[in-house]
Amino acid sequence: MASTPSPRTATTTLQNSLLSSSSSSVNHNKPSNLSFLHASSNSSSLKLFHSVSASFSPSNSSSTICNVIKTVESADISFSNARDLDGVVSIPKPTILVSEKLGEAGLDLLRSFGNVDCSYDLSPQDLCAKISLCDALIVRSGTKVTREVFEAAQGRLKVVGRAGVGIDNVDLQAATEFGCLVVNAPTANTIAAAEHGIALLTSMARNVAQADASMKAGKWLRSKYVGVSLVGKTLAVMGFGKVGSEVARRAKGLGMHVIAHDPYAPADRARAIGVDLVSFEQAIATADFVSLHMPLTPATKKVFNDDTFAKMKKGVRLINVARGGVIDEDALVRALDSGIVAQAALDVFTVEPPPKDSKLVQHENVTVTPHLGASTKEAQEGVAIEIAEAVVGALNGELSATAVNAPMVPPEVLSELAPYVVLAEKLGRLAVQLVTGGSGIQNVKVVYKSARDPDSLDTRLLRAMVTKGIIEPISDTIINLVNADFSAKQKGLRISEERVIVDSSPEYPVESIQVQISNVQSRFASALSENGNISIEGKVKYGVPHLTRVGSFSVDVSLEGNLILCKQVDQPGMIGQVGNILGESNVNVSFMSVGRTVRRKQAIMAIGVDEEPNKDTQKKIGEVSAIEEFVFLKL
Ligand SMILES: NC(=O)C1=CN([C@@H]2O[C@H](COP(=O)(O)OP(=O)(O)OC[C@H]3O[C@@H](n4cnc5c(N)ncnc54)[C@H](O)[C@@H]3O)[C@@H](O)[C@H]2O)C=CC1
Ligand SMILES: O=C(O)C(=O)COP(=O)(O)O
């Protein structure tokens, strides 16, 4: 193949980084699963190969690890191959479809790399019709990138770029199944969203939108639109992440007393800007204003509902620039009608756009904006550049720090580590559930005992899976090998690793994995080791992950289903008593293990259960006199 690059093509870097000119198969050892461009040496025909990537969702980690090894060859790429006059084969430019308005600087960057098709307001049918001619798609929150879109792409779509934070409009599972990388731009619109939150807060307090509408209708209603002052009032920031902390900082500047609720934010980061982290109940019961900045996850869906509104101060005011789905919108209408909520200012809605006759939108005490949080010139330029760089990088086959669905590990490493990957995630998931809400997690240490030389043990995937286990239950980010470190850093989480070389068989990559979380309180004090850290350890036995240590106690339970940990006085009959209570409420016990430090003193009982025991059953377990503490953990 000729080596002179054509200036009219965008292929130089592609060729340099990805082109495998002599092999006819995908190079699995290359630590990238994006696109491998292969030019056959005896043919001018260019083919694009996709390696199917794995999704590491908790429910399917082991099966998809096997899938990752599968490689499929796509059809010939459809942009035509061209030869320059001097005979140099030029690879056609990729086509990038931009389906929503994107800043010019980002578009310029994309145009310098590929053919850019800006087609806004496409119907779902039109999007599906176009997508098979596109290598990349860039969207904001208005385009639904559904399974149908990936199906219609017929294997050509390599990357979807979300020019913003929330990726709830992209079917990530489908993207992963179709081998399509999804990247987002998580930082460039933080300030814009925070400023919009403050704009809604202040304009709501002074009835700016309502007064403006009434004047335009020819009225002069000075006494109707008397507002409320902000100084000295309490603002509860729900979700103390990137946007929430910037809102808090600004509200302090307005003279407000700011508290925040975020079970996973470090208290010292809040204290540094004069904000107290409090419990959910305390936040909603004491606030005059409540501003929402948490992600939409199963745990936060409709978390503001009839029950929570009933616990709020009468006359509370609510701001939402996060996601509409965290509020039960019907319950909010009821709370507004009853006066519990005096006013609400909303930028986001469960369905966007909301129905024209939405009672919430039409309510006279509600101020609305059409999802404008990220819509400043500056944020849109920033987001556009951030996403354009990520998409171009992905088309070049580079690792992306903001990839949300693409693990990149050689298949042979994956297959060997598969059971340890499951163990690592489960240990992370267990460890985070042992932390008392509100403690804030900062330091996590993962200790691998292994007989292997450190150089021949690649722990990136294991570390990523521990990180995934810790972060996913508390965020809407999907963690994988690519974004694990980035996400941990974003959340102020320091994950350190230690290798302990043991004298056992190097046939197995890892003997045990220990996860330690330091400087936190535990819901289960016995999980604290002598040095005060939450510490749990697991091993893989016959291919199945097992929990082998909790704090200073040895146990041996396979990590399947759910787990109850009890600390009790080591005496006869304990297994029977707890087993009976579970049996009476039809909770099936899959295994039990008792570990103790000293005979007839304290012991830990680990009980695997298929079903989640209800509150009554848990209460009964807690009432067994010899049981000192217990905790229910979902695996
Ligand atoms: N309206 C708009 O145009 C925009 C909306 N957003 C939305 O704002 C939200 C926040 O975005 P970022 O600050 O960038 O995300 P982030 O990930 O930095 O912060 C989210 C915080 O919520 C916390 N959290 C998780 N579960 C929680 C719970 N149950 N209760 C309280 N806190 C909880 C997390 O620990 C984290 O600190 C997201 O939903 C995002 O989609 C972001 C940008 C623009
Ligand atoms: O970044 C986010 O999460 C947003 O909600 C911004 O949405 P947008 O890009 O303005 O449609």
Image (cartoon, rainbow, N blue to C red):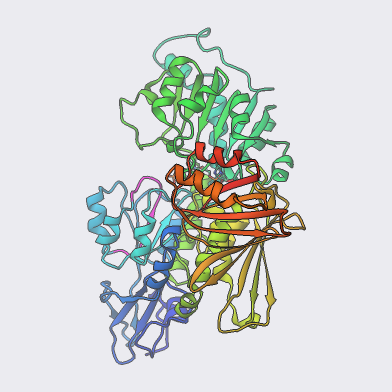
Quadrant assignment, res 254:
top right
Q: Can you give x and y, in whole percent of width and height, for residue 611 in the image? A: 44, 49
Q: Residue at x 25, y 72 (%)?
A: 78
Residue furthest out toward the right = 531
Quadrant assignment, res 427:
bottom right
Q: Does 289 appear above or below 447? A: above
Closest to the observer, 441 or 24: 441
Quadrant assignment, res 439:
top right
Residue furthest out toward the bottom = 42
Q: Residue at x 40, y 67 (%)?
A: 64
Q: Is residue 63 magenta?
A: no
Q: Magenta segment, which residues?
A: 134-144
Total labels: the figure holds 0
Closest to the observer, 141 or 387: 141
Q: Quadrant of the N terminus?
A: bottom left
Q: Is residue 143 magenta?
A: yes
Q: Can you give x and y, in whole percent of width and height, for residue 26 in the image? A: 38, 82
Instruction: State left or right for residue 226 relative to residue 134.
Output: right
Q: Residue at x 47, y 50 (%)?
A: 164
Judged by its main secondary structure, the magenta piece is loop
